[in-house]
């Protein structure tokens, strides 16, 4: 291979690398997130950054019902047999049986005169402690059991409630400045909504238009209303959705998702189920 042919080959290879490196970088980085949960509390919204599927929208407005656990019920003879079972004896409610008369120690005769003191053997501490502990054991046991019964039962701690899932979804439709006309590249977003409403004839939606805080408040309120009406009319005209199933509302800048009310991410169209 001549020197000129080598330079041509290296030049072609460099062009190939320049063309393929951006593609490889995107592949290594992975797909961008298609949806994000924004807002908090009851104002949570599932925002889609690309046209969603019907299944994705259904997962927001009509999530799967919670799994119900099966309970066990005792009926008929099983319940009667359980009721007739003898209850265990409670040691607290039942005293010890009295000692039979034959086992009682005989009374000692009273002395008629004072006896001379006689040196008594010193009692052994171990035997006395053993006698006291053995004689007081039933009393202590009963007191401990009574204390356990009198102590109030600990209240069960309330389980933490799971965080509520968003019940609304939205798109950041790129309307032109001061315009309510739906851009052609945003029509596929609303087409997914139309397909969802066709699939579920009982579903009604409220279409909300939102703006940021830039500009005059009365004008922004009117502009957000016009954009919501434009989306509703598209669903009726293109997808033949009954107008009675659609409600439109202009929120203007009154319900921002971003902390900064002037943030452009607050400009959006939201859809909330009404059934």
Image (cartoon, grey):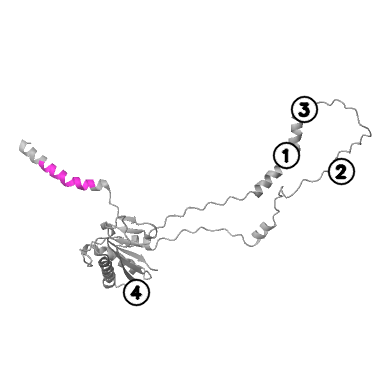
Q: CA distance from mark 2 to mark 1?
A: 23 Å
Q: Secondary structure at mark 2?
A: helix
- Residue 5: which quarter of the image? top left
Q: Secondary structure at mark 4?
A: helix
Q: Earlier in the sequence, mark 2 or mark 4?
A: 2
Q: Quadrant of the C terminus?
A: bottom left
Left or right of 73: which side holds 262? left
Q: Which residue is mark 2?
A: 101
Viewer-closest of 222 and 97: 222
Determine whether the residue tagged by mark 1 lies in a helix, strand or loop: helix
Seen at 74% across and 33% down, the residue is: 130
Residue range corresponding to the magenta coloring:
11-25
Q: Which residue is mark 1?
A: 137
Q: Are marks 3 and 1 in contact (CB under 8 Å)?
A: no
Tell us which disc is closer to us: 3 or 1.
Answer: 3
Examine the image and state in which quarter residue 219 appears. Answer: bottom left
Q: CA distance from mark 2 to mark 4?
A: 94 Å
Would you call the spot at circle 3 few (<14 residues within 10 Å), some (14-19), or many (20 or more)? few
Q: Which residue is mark 3?
A: 124
- Classed neighbour count for the residue bearing mark 1: other residues with Cα under 10 Å, few (<14), some (14–19), many (≥20): few
CA gap, disc 3 and disc 2 = 30 Å
Give the image location of residue 95, x and y in percent.
76, 47
Quadrant location of residue 235?
bottom left
Specify which label sits upstream in the sequence, 4 or 1. 1
Query: Which is nearer the eye, 11 or 154?
Result: 154
Disc number placed over residue 244 in the picture, else none? 4
Is residue 76 visible from the viewing direction of this image? Answer: yes
Which residue is drawn at the image coordinates 87% and 41% (left, top)? 102
The alpha-carbon separation of the residues under discs 4 and 3 comes to 99 Å
Alpha-carbon span between mark 4 and mark 1? 81 Å
Q: Quadrant of the N terminus?
A: top left
């Amino acid at each position: 291979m001549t020197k000129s042919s080598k330079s041509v080959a290296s030049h072609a290879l460099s062009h190939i690398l320049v063309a393929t490196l951006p593609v490889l970088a995107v592949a290594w980085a992975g797909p961008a997130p298609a949806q994000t949960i924004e807002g908090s509390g009851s104002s949570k919204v599932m925002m889609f950054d690309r046209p969603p599927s019907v299944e994705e929208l259904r997962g927001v407005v009509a999530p799967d019902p919670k799994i119900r656990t099966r309970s066990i019920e005792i009926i008929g003879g099983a319940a009667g047999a359980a009721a007739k079972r003898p209850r265990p004896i409670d040691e607290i409610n039942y005293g010890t049986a009295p000692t039979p008369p034959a086992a009682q120690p005989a009374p000692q005769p009273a002395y008629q005169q004072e006896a001379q003191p006689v040196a008594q053997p010193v009692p052994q501490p171990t035997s006395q402690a053993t006698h006291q502990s053995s004689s007081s054991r039933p009393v202590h046991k009963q007191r401990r059991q009574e204390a356990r019964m009198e102590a109030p039962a600990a209240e069960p701690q309330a389980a933490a409630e799971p965080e509520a899932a968003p019940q609304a979804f939205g798109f950041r439709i790129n309307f032109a400045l001061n315009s309510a006309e739906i851009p052609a590249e945003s029509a596929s977003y609303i087409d997914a909504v139309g397909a969802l409403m066709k699939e579920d004839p009982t579903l009604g939606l409220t279409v909300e238009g939102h703006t940021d805080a830039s500009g005059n408040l009365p004008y922004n309120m009117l502009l957000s209303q016009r954009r919501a009406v434009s989306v509703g009319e598209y669903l009726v005209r293109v997808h033949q959705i009954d107008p009675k199933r659609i409600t439109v509302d202009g929120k203007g800048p009154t319900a921002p998702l971003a902390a900064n009310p002037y943030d452009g991410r607050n400009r959006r169209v939201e859809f909330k189920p009404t059934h």
